[in-house]
Amino acid sequence: MNLEDRPMQRIVDIAERIFVVLLAIPFVIAFAKVLPTHPNSILVCISELLGVILIVIRRSAPLRIGSVAVLAAFLGTALPLLVRPGGVQLVPTLVSSVLMFSGLALSIASKLYLNRSFGLIAANRGVKTRGPYRFVRHPMYLGYIINQLGFLLSSFTLVTLVIYLVAWTIQVVRVREEESVLRADPNYRDFSARVPTRLIPGLF
């Protein structure tokens, strides 16, 4: 689909904002019920909901409206909002809390540097090179993975495991889709040369 299709751009832009808000409502309700007994669940709530807030207030930009880009963007955001608290605690609370807090801190720092440039679907809303972006080209997604891993280890179920495995795979697809857009910008090509790691140091 042509990037210059402005009516479709507008429809998708509005749809993704409504989409994440509707998904966030049952997510918040489910986690609010367990916060008194599982206070560290607030860490995964903050991580996921901050993304929702930034999507709602973000500035518009030309989107990569292709089937893969749109599907990856929506699924990558939707799937983590489908997890629910409960399950088996596999590691001490301290371990899971450290993972969740570390991932949350990294994703928040990344989002603060993005500010209103944050969005679901691949688009060039400005090349960010400061803060955590000096070390990883997509630190926000890395923060999500670390945070979600901590939650998985604290509330393990097969359903949550499958959701996160699929979500993490989709994050790799999102990275590829975003970079296919950003590499058209010479500033991003220079940035990529300085920061070789896209998502996970030593792996990808």
Image (cartoon, helix red, strand yellow):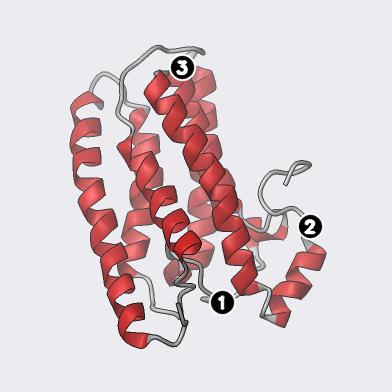
Label 2 with label 3: CB-CB less than 8 Å: no
Whichever of callouts 3 and 1 sits on the residue coming sooner in the sequence is 3
N-terminal of the pair, mark 1 or mark 2, is: 1
Position in image of residue 10 (x %, y %): 31, 79
Q: Residue 116 carries which label?
A: none
Q: Residues within 10 Å of mark 1 (few under 14, many from 20)?
A: some
Task: Provide residue 50's location: percent of width, then percent of height.
Answer: 37, 53
Q: Disc 3 designates what residue?
A: 93
Residue 126 badge: 1
Can the viewer see residue 83 in this picture?
yes
For badge 2, the amino acid type reads: Pro
Q: Is residue 195 above or below residue 12?
A: above
The residue that label 2 is drawn on is 196
Closer to us: 189 or 44: 189
Position of the N terminus, as image quadrant, is bottom left
Side of 98 relative to 73 (left or right) = right
* Residue type for callout 3: Thr
Using the rendered image of the protein, determine whether residue 151 is visible from the camera's viewpoint.
no
